[in-house]
Amino acid sequence: MIGVFAGTFLYFRLLKKFDLPTDDLWKNICIIFFVGLIGARATYIILYPEQFSSFYEVVAIWQGGLVSYGGILAGILAALLEFRGRYLVLKLNLLAPSFFVGWIFGRIGGFVTQNAVGILNNSFGPIFYSRVPIQLFESLLSLVIVILSVILIFKLDRKFILKYPIILITSLGDYTLGRFIIDFWREDPKVFLGLQFGQLISFFIFFCCIIMLLYIFRSRKKIS
């Protein structure tokens, strides 16, 4: 919840900076948040159906069981539906660093509760549960993405970020690349070519981001 409020505050400040209305701010955030939560849970249920034997277990998200990529993609879909209109692309670009502000705190929470744990490593003492603190690595990754995204928002031409979701795609590409690397220290089974399922998804999304970025810059070059 700290992450939700911190991300919402940054999103509010960015909207004001670009003179965009904030009347529906909390409605938009709540819808995106809960759709993302449902998407993260639904993805987990699809991937691990054997873990559920009753409706109570399906809705008991407080016992764990969320897939981040399912939540991210569901949240983006919700944002597309919520932001439809003239400033759709700009709002998506402004939402990207705001999401990763929330993710900074979310992964710290994951470290405290030991969610998505790293592999055992005695080099890290009891304060890190004698495991590689991949949650903190991901939190640091999110901080770097926030900083880079905000810099791009203010450095790039306004017409460019009005027309192309460059910040959204760049931040998502940075995240998937970082996740792919961090997950080498994640305690998860290997499924293909020595890679985990999450790494395969990371690679696929990163590849899609590269293709979209190439298309954007090629289109911009033709126009200019």
Image (cartoon, rainbow, N blue to C red):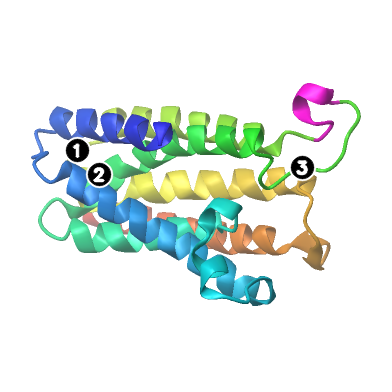
Residue 222: x and y in percent read 27, 57
Q: Which residues are magenta?
A: 124-131
Separation of disc 3 and disc 2 at Cα?
A: 37 Å
Which of the pair 55/10 is nearer the observer?
A: 55
Disc 2 target residue: 161
Closer to the eye: label 3 or 1: 3
- Name the main secondary structure of what is drawn in magenta: loop
Separation of disc 2 and disc 1 at Cα?
A: 5 Å
Residue 123: x and y in percent read 89, 26
Is residue 162 in sight in this rendering?
no
Query: Mark 3, residues whose alpha carbon is within 10 Å: few (<14), some, or many (≥20)?
Result: many
Q: Going 79% across and 31% down the picture, which residue do you hit?
A: 129
Of the residues shown, which amino acid type is indicated by label 3?
Answer: Gly
Q: Going 81% across and 35% down the picture, which residue do you hit?
A: 131
Disc 1 target residue: 158
Q: Are marks 3 and 1 in contact (CB under 8 Å)?
A: no
Magenta stretch holds residue 4 = no
Of the residues shown, which amino acid type is indicated by label 2?
Answer: Ile
Q: Could you tell whether 146 is left or right of 183 in the image?
A: left
Q: Could you tell whether 146 is left or right of 80 in the image?
A: right
Magenta stretch holds residue 129 = yes
Residue 45: x and y in percent read 57, 71
- The tally of labels here is 3
Which of the pair 98/55 is nearer the observer?
A: 55
Dot 1 falls on a residue whose secondary structure is helix
Q: Indicate which disc, 3 or 1, sits on the residue closer to the N terminus.
A: 3
Separation of disc 3 and disc 1 at Cα?
A: 41 Å
Disc 3 target residue: 118
Query: Mark 2, residues whose alpha carbon is within 10 Å: few (<14), some, or many (≥20)?
Result: many
Q: Could you tell whether 34 is left or right of 69 in the image?
A: left
Dot 3 falls on a residue whose secondary structure is loop
Q: Are marks 2 and 1 in contact (CB under 8 Å)?
A: yes
